[in-house]
């Protein structure tokens, strides 16, 4: 049985957002592979040619970036990565609500399966899945999306596309930092996430944190640096007054999370926050702000520019 665990590095994102509607071709490039042996967390994948039927749940951002359409897409019940749906509307779901078994994967007849974290499969469950297709397992593909893209590009004969996508993102970040600089000097930032039963102060080590603080060079608020940097922390109303950041980005994970967020926002403690008083609180789409890849990160950069640069 394949399992999906929830945590700071393996969220179940809500369904929001959109992306350009240019769909990629249905299969991987036919380019010859420069490598044929790929070591990973649970062993080695050997490929003689570029695969054509790929299943890579929650790594569809990378596949689309490389011009590859998977034969199945990640879902969690009705939830999908909506920002990728313009590319994947006709791709069947691979539902992780109860984990994934061999029969579910076998139905898609993949010739390569890629799992984005070891949390999706315990090591003792690995061997049976290799009977279906070569199976590559990342430790955590979200920590370094650039390296992830390079690995997937190497396995699919699309290394040139991977390199071009990374360079395009770096160019965009360079341009964005120049535009932001007059507005963000000596300012601090934070991201909070509303879940159905808790409000979290988000970390600086995954997803939006990497884009804001590492890529764009924004200054995290001291509470982020000292308390939630490596892992998101539950933020109570009592602790809220400590969050005197200049800018706050708010992520709401689905409609079930809105009542708790509204409870916070109607509190005098919230209304007295520095960012609230100055109109510097911005709602952002949870779906791709809680994802990692060239597409989702580019969209995060665009969101930040739109919010801050006037």
Image: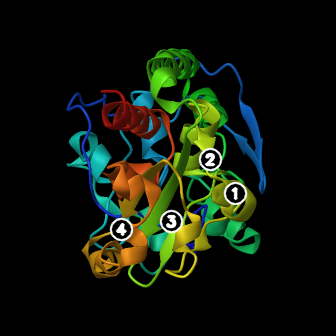
Q: Residue beneath label 1, please?
A: 229
Q: CA distance from mark 1 to mark 4?
A: 25 Å
Task: Return the mark for residue 276.
Answer: none
Residue situated furthest bottom in the rendering: 197
Mark 3 Cα shell of 10 Å, populated few (<14), some (14-19), many (≥20):
few
Between residue 289 and residue 22, name the one nearer to us: 289
Between residue 222 and residue 78, name the one nearer to us: 222
Q: Contact, CB < 8 Å: mark 2 with mark 1?
A: yes
The answer to whether residue 204 is above or below residue 158 is: below
Q: Contact, CB < 8 Å: mark 3 with mark 2?
A: no
Q: Element under label 2?
A: strand
Give the mark nearest the N terminus, 4 or 2. 2
Give the mark nearest the N terminus, 1 or 4. 1
Q: Residue beneath label 3, please?
A: 11
User: From the viewer's perspective, is the residue at label 1 or at label 4 nearer?
Assistant: 4
Q: Quarter holding the N terminus?
A: bottom right
Give the mark nearest the N terminus, 3 or 4. 3
Q: Residue beneath label 2, please?
A: 220
Mark 1 Cα shell of 10 Å, populated few (<14), some (14-19), many (≥20):
some
Give me the residue at 31% from left, 28% from top: 25
Q: Element under label 1?
A: loop
Q: Position of residue 109 (x, y in %)?
A: 43, 54
Q: Residue beneath label 4, please?
A: 271
Give the mark nearest the N terminus, 3 or 2. 3
Give me the residue at 67% from left, 33% from top: 147
The answer to whether residue 197 is above or below residue 173 is: below
Q: CA distance from mark 1 to mark 3?
A: 17 Å
Q: CA distance from mark 2 to mark 1?
A: 9 Å
């Amino acid at each position: 049985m394949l399992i999906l665990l929830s945590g700071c590095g393996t969220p179940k994102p809500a369904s929001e957002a959109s992306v350009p509607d240019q769909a990629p071709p249905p299969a991987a490039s036919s380019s010859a592979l420069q490598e044929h042996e790929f070591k990973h967390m649970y062993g080695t994948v050997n490929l003689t040619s570029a695969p054509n039927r790929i299943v890579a749940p929650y790594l569809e951002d990378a596949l689309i970036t490389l011009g590859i359409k998977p034969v199945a897409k990640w879902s969690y019940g009705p939830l999908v990565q909506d920002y990728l749906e313009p590319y994947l509307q006709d791709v069947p779901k691979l539902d992780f609500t109860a984990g994934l078994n061999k029969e579910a994967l076998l139905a898609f007849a993949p010739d390569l399966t890629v799992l984005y974290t070891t949390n999706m499969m315990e090591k003792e469950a690995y061997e049976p899945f290799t009977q279906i297709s070569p199976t590559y397992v990342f430790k955590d593909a979200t920590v370094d999306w650039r390296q992830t893209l390079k690995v997937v590009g190497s396995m699919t004969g699309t290394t040139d596309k991977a390199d071009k996508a990374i360079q395009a993102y770096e160019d965009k970040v360079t341009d964005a930092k120049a535009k932001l600089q007059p507005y963000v000097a000596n300012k601090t930032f934070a991201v909070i996430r509303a879940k159905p039963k808790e409000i979290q102060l988000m970390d600086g080590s995954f997803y939006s944190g990497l884009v804001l603080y590492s890529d764009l060079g924004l200054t995290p608020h001291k509470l982020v640096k000292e308390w939630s940097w490596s892992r998101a922390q539950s933020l109570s109303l009592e602790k809220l007054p400590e969050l005197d950041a200049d800018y706050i980005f708010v992520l709401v994970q689905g409609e079930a999370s809105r009542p708790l967020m509204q409870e916070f926002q109607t509190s005098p403690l919230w209304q007295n926050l520095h960012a609230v008083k100055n109109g510097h609180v911005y709602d952002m789409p949870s779906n791709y702000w809680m994802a990692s890849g060239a597409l989702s990160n580019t969209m995060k950069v665009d969101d930040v520019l739109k919010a801050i640069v006037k």
